[in-house]
Image: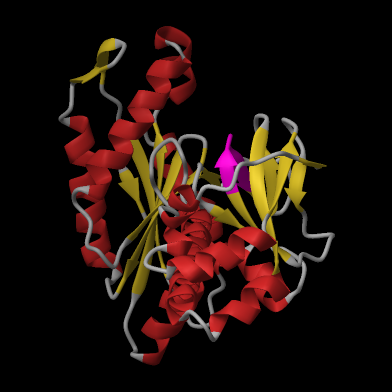
Amino acid sequence: MKNANWKQDLQQISRVRLFHNVAASSLEQLLREFRACDLEAGEVLLSPFNRNQFLYLLLEGELKVYLGSLDNQPVSTLQTGECAGEISFIDNDHPCAYVVATQPSKVLRLHRESLVSLFNQSPQLMQNLLELLCERVRQGNRIILDSEQNANVDTLTGCFNRRWLDYVYERESTRCAFNEQPLCLLMLDVDHFKAYNDQHGHLAGDYALCLVAHTLRQQLRPKDSLVRYGGEEFVILLPEIAADEARSIGERLRLSLEQIGSFYSPVGILPGVTVSIGLSQMQPRDVLEKLIARADSALYQAKLQGRNRLCG
């Protein structure tokens, strides 16, 4: 970071959100405290490894924010007029993210002591800063939520993944056992999927898996969990449903796919697929692995008997 020349511009600063409706006299005092700095493309402005005592206001260029590592995808982009370093600037601690210039950029740097001394003179300045901090917190919460959701969802089909299955089984099995309610699990396998990929291509196979996921999802209750267990295998957790009803549900799902002779996809019209299904019902003190093992054994029987059928 190098010192830069910058012609003080009261109008430009007053348009920045942080200084919105702040008295001109306070802004003039702030301008005397600011220091302009130039950043090279790729230069790290803030890092979790270095304590920060400055607030940065971006005048020119662009900054990107990275969480955890610079190898990760950026979580946000800061444009002209936005601030960086508000949280660490306030608590005089290490930043929680990396902030990097993606192109040659110019920032105004203000030491925390200079701004703190103005808070008593300008309550509006404090209000603006609090609003910016609230936005940062809400943005952080959204990032956490999105990360959690992405960690639990299969990106191809939009179904939950095995990580979610471990969590939801623990929750639902405990709840059903406490309420003396049954719980069933269906394990589905797309029939002859390798041959389907070999004949129509792996992209067509991906669309077929999406078709299966969409068809199944449309017929399940909100409390049911559809999981892509791996490859062409799916698992459906059915809380508060006993084996007889689960068998009817499985047959309905199997038939709904059997009736799709062909479907439209971005690569053209493709033939539909069928599924084989294994069913198991939770027994007292069942762990997930035992429930899946029994469903998998039933699924194996369905394949031996000619596929496109349900056993268990």
Q: In the image shown, does 297 or 35 lie closer to the viewer?
A: 35
- For this orientation, the residue located farthest to the right is 49
Q: Quadrant of residue 238?
A: bottom left
Q: What residue do we see at 23% from left, 56% from top?
A: 220
Up/down of 18 relative to 123, above or below = above
Q: Residue 298 at what x, y percent from top left? A: 44, 51
Residue 291 in sight in this render: no
Magenta span includes 135: no
Q: Is residue 38 above or below residue 186?
A: above
Task: State the image quarter where residue 68 is shown.
Answer: bottom right
Q: Nearer the viewer, residue 167 or 307?
A: 167
User: Relative to the observer, which residue lies in front, 38 or 303?
Assistant: 38
Q: Which residues are magenta?
A: 58-65
Q: Is residue 177 above or below residue 282?
A: below
61 within the magenta span = yes
**Residue 177 point in image, percent of width and height:** 41, 86
Residue 69, percent across and down? 74, 48
Colour scheme: secondary structure
Total marks drawn? 0
Examine the rendered structure and indicate whether residue 23 appears above or below residue 76. Answer: below
Name the magenta segment's main secondary structure.
Answer: strand
Q: Residue 114, image x and y in percent?
A: 68, 72
Give the residue at x 34% y 89%.
180
Identify the residue at horizontal 42%, vertical 36% (top origin).
303
Horizontally, residue 106 falls left or right of residue 125, namely: right
Front in this rendered view, residue 142 or 32: 32
Q: Quadrant of the C terminus?
A: bottom left
On the question of residue 153 being in view, the answer is yes
- Quarter of the rendering occupied by the N terminus: top right
Q: Residue at x 48, y 75 (%)?
A: 130
